Every structure is written in C-alpha cells, then in structure tokens.
Amino acid sequence: MNKNYSLEDLSKISKELISSLKNKTLLFYGQMGVGKTTLIKETCTQLGVLDNISSPTFSLVNEYHTENQGKVFHFDFYRIEDENEALDMGIEEYFESENWCLIEWPENIENLLPLDAVEIHLTILDDNKRNINIKQ
C-alpha cells in the first residue's frame, strides 16, 4: 500500500492497514513529527484497545488490553542508546508473544527486529498531508 492521506482519512487508513497485514509486528519509520504516534493511536483504537493510549517515550513500552485482540504492545525506541537495553527488557519475548507489536524508531534496534516484520514508512507532504508506504 502506498497512499497519501490527511488526518481526516486516518481512521480509513488505519482500517486498511490492519486488514492488509501479514504480520502483527509493525515498524513505524519517519522523521520526528510525521505522525507515527498519531497513526499508532488510531490503529490501537481500531484494534479495540480499552486503555488510554500514549507514547511510551520514557518507559520504552506500553501494554494495552483490547476487547478481542488480546494485548497490544507499543514501543518507542527514540531514546534507546544501545540494543542491549531492548534485550534487557525482553524484546524477544514480546516478538514471540503473537500479540501486536507497534514500534516507533525501529532503526535504533535494527539488529533485533524480526525479519518478517512489516515496515511502515511515513513522509510529510505538507502541513495536512502525509504519505504511507507499507512494505511486507
């Protein structure tokens, strides 16, 4: 999938994203301010997350519970300095859990990522438009 969208399209884009996926580990790439967290919040809403959805910038991971999908893990590796930090928190167990794993700044743990993870690249087109490019 390669599409341009605006914030008004976010719900539709998120639904399309979920329905087209072959894997539950999603890697969100894009510069600061592109809307990674915003898209993840909407994706969590579409997955039926019952909890308050916020960026785990300082805690590295937030765990959310859903009505039907079990758990969703939301990672933010922006502040990670060494991949060993991710290993110490048990990242491999999260990946093996078969739950949704939504990862911001995956490039900071590049050597630990599952080979079959879905790459989601976001680009700013202008103040109101973004591009999403999904690589499976």
Image (cartoon, rainbow, N blue to C red):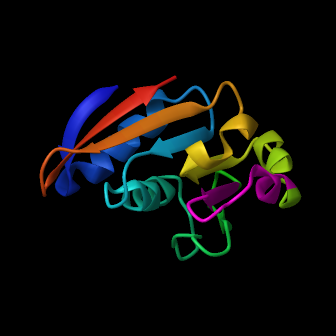
Residue 84 horizontal side relative to residue 10, left or right: right
Q: Which residues are magenta?
A: 71-87
Tell which of 17 and 76 is nearer to you: 76
Residue 16 x/y as whole percent: 37, 36
- Which residue: 41% across, 29% down? 134
View extreme (front): residue: 81
Tell which of 42 and 34 is nearer to you: 34
Residue 121 horizontal side relative to residue 55, left or right: left
Is residue 79 found inside the magenta-colored segment of the image? yes
Q: Quadrant of residue 82?
A: bottom right
- Which residue: 53% across, 59% down? 48
Residue 47 x/y as whole percent: 53, 53
How many numbered marks does the figure carry? 0
In the rendered image, the vertical position of residue 115 relative to residue 106, given as above or below: above
- Which residue: 51% across, 73% down? 54
Q: Quadrant of residue 118?
A: top right
Tell which of 16 and 6 is nearer to you: 6
Is residue 74 found inside the magenta-colored segment of the image? yes
In the rendered image, the vertical position of residue 55 relative to residue 88, given as above or below: below
Residue 1 x/y as whole percent: 34, 25
Q: Quadrant of residue 76?
A: bottom right
In the rendered image, the vertical position of residue 41 relative to residue 106, given as above or below: below
Residue 69 horizontal side relative to residue 6, left or right: right
Residue 33 x/y as whole percent: 32, 61
- Which residue: 67% across, 66% down? 60
Tell which of 45 and 27 is nearer to you: 27
